């Protein structure tokens, strides 16, 4: 097999495109007693199936207000930032926990909770969700929730089987219903990206490399590997 410079560059480019198209790693925040008083903000882009819906956006902020034994206490704020020509209603938000949650309560705009339920839009099981209506599903229901430009606030408590010295939250989602102006899409979900600045997040947020950086790393690694193979073939031919 003869490898020339052109084939090496083409292979490296293909690998970089593949890496750029890979989904981002899940954003997480790690909380302990030193995190009390800290706030963590997430921005959401709506999607239906595998397609992102332009203009379908949201933002949430979670503030750890206290820890007592096996319970963690939070204030929350959820904003529907959906913009024209799209309209929507946010009916729930949720996330996963580590360790596993055993109970949750909430107040305010999303005062109903469900544990260990399937989140819509093929997301699958999620540890806890907070909803605008007393429904069994994580999607929420009725005509409540937050319409374009509205912000809802409240508090929630997470309970665990034993005292927890460190809590990890990840896989943050919101649910959009009553979507209008987005073609055939009438409902969707949004995946949260941690936008908390380092100055306000002493213990949370897993940094995720930008896709472009991953692509450049892929180009370099693949090119190095192929050049080594080329040298091996050249030596074998002598």
Image: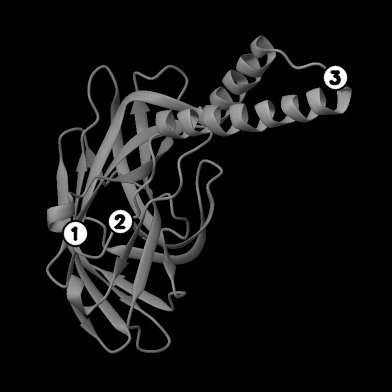
In the image, taking residue 152 as reference, residue 218 lies left or right, namely right
Q: Measured from the top left, where is residue 132 in percent x and y?
A: 30, 54
Above or below residue 72? Residue 142 is above
Quickly name the residue at label 1.
201
Residue 235 visible in the shown view: yes
Q: Measured from the top left, where is residue 182 in percent x and y?
A: 38, 20
**Upstream in sequence: badge 2 or badge 3:** 3
Residue extending farthest to the top is 6
In percent of the image, x 34 and y 34: which residue is there? 45
Q: Measured from the top left, where is residue 155 in percent x and y?
A: 19, 66
Return the residue nearer the eye: 28 or 110. Answer: 28
Quickly name the residue at label 3.
1
Return the residue nearer the eye: 20 or 69. Answer: 20
Return the residue nearer the eye: 191 or 189. Answer: 191
The Cα–Cα distance between marks 2 and 3, rounded to whole angstroms, is 46 Å
- C-beta proximity under 8 Å, tags 1 and 2: yes
In percent of the image, x 51 and y 41: which residue is there? 121
């Amino acid at each position: 097999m003869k490898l020339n410079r052109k084939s090496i560059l083409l292979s490296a480019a293909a690998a970089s495109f593949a890496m750029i198209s890979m989904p981002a790693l899940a954003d997480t925040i790690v909380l302990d007693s030193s995190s009390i008083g800290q706030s963590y903000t997430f921005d959401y882009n709506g999607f239906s199936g595998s397609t992102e819906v332009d203009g379908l956006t949201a933002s949430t902020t979670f503030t750890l207000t206290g820890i007592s034994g096996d319970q963690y206490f939070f204030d929350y704020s959820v904003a529907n930032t959906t913009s024209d020509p799209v309209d929507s209603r946010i009916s729930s938000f949720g996330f996963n926990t580590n360790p596993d949650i055993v109970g949750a309560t909430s107040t305010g705009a999303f005062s109903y909770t469900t544990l260990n339920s399937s989140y819509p839009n093929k997301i699958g099981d999620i540890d806890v969700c907070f909803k605008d209506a007393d429904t069994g599903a994580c999607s929420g229901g009725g005509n409540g929730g937050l319409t374009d430009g509205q912000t809802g606030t409240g508090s929630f408590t997470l309970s665990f089987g034993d005292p927890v010295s460190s809590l990890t939250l990840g896989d943050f989602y919101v649910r959009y219903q009553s979507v209008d102006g987005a073609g055939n899409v009438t409902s969707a979900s949004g995946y949260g990206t941690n936008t908390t600045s380092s100055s306000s997040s002493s213990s949370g947020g897993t940094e995720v490399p930008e896709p472009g950086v991953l692509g450049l790393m892929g180009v370099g690694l693949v090119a190095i590997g192929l050049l080594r193979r080329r040298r091996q073939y050249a030596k074998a031919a002598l």
